[in-house]
Amino acid sequence: MSTTSLTESKLTQVLDWTYEKAINGLPGTETAAELAESYLRKHSSVEAAIDSLIRWQNAKGVTSGFVTGLGGLITLPVSIPANVASVMYVQIRMIATIAHMKGYDLKDDQVKTFVFVCLTGQAASDIMKQAGIKLGTALATQAIKKIPVEVIKAINKAVGIKLITKFGQKGIINLGKAVPLLGGVIGGAVDGIGTHTIGKTAKKVFS
């Protein structure tokens, strides 16, 4: 795939595929819900568990065992560099894990939309503001289901545009340098594209 051909429809396919794998698991990896429960067991509060999760994703990135589990990435619905798909998977699973810890139903389409919003990092608050949603107030677990379909569609569109820019030409080139899959470790490089920021954003969005 050339770096400029990451279209909105391709991105949507990859996001949907990655979300499904984060929820249902890849071979040898925990699902988002399993990851959430294991962190909750180790910590005295939800907030402490979330902070620990973000630190772990940030510091250790992904070990070689995890990358082996990503063998499933060869079944990606569209041709997108494996390193980009891997980073998307790591970040989406982290966000979904945080949402689960906060009591959101990962099978809800609205929750899925806001997981993708978190992927945009610092742009998330602008995207939500444009949609008339104030970060950290309107997303109560029940209220999220009442957001109109038109608003969800508008949010999805804004997220798509933002992520195409993020994973577009420069992003993919940088990721190629930063995430050597064959090296077996996706390390501090993942933070280079904002895993820490994304984790903190998820904490605010699913507050």
Image (cartoon, grey):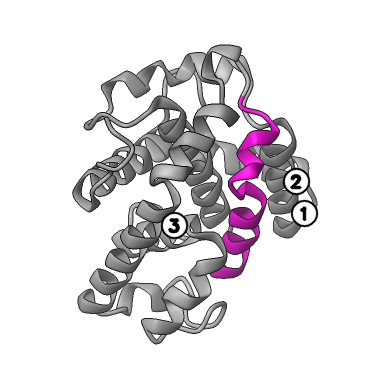
Image position, residue 5 (x, y; %)? 25, 41
From this view, report whether residue 116 is shown above or below residue 26.
below
Q: What kind of residue is marked 2?
A: Ser
* Residue drawn at (50%, 28%) of the image: 176
Q: Disc number at residue 184?
A: none
**N-terminal-most mark, 3 or 2:** 2
Residues under labels 3 and 2: Cα distance?
A: 19 Å
Q: What kind of residue is marked 3?
A: Val
Image position, residue 78 (x, y; %)? 22, 32
Residues under labels 1 and 3: Cα distance?
A: 20 Å
From this view, report whether residue 157 is shown above or below residue 40.
below
Which quarter of the image is occupied by the N terminus? Answer: top left
Which quarter of the image is occupied by the C terminus? Answer: bottom right
* Residue drawn at (59%, 44%) of the image: 36
* Label 2 crowd (10 A; few <14 / some 14-19 / many >=20): some
Q: Disc number at residue 115?
A: 3
Foreground pick, 194 / 102: 194
* Residue drawn at (56%, 45%) of the image: 94
The magenta stretch is: 186-207
Q: Mark 2: which secondary structure?
A: helix
From this view, report whether residue 147 is shown above or below residue 195.
below
Q: What kind of residue is marked 1?
A: Ala
Circle 2 sits on which residue?
52
Foreground pick, 55 / 100: 55
Outermost residue, bottom side = 132
Image position, residue 33 (x, y; %)? 51, 42
Residues at marks 1 and 2 touching, judged by CB atoms closer than 8 Å? yes
Magenta segment, principal secondary structure?
A: helix
Location of residue 151 (image quadrant): bottom left
Q: Mark 3: which secondary structure?
A: helix
- Does residue 88 appear to the left or right of 46 in the view shown? left
Q: Disc number at residue 48?
A: 1
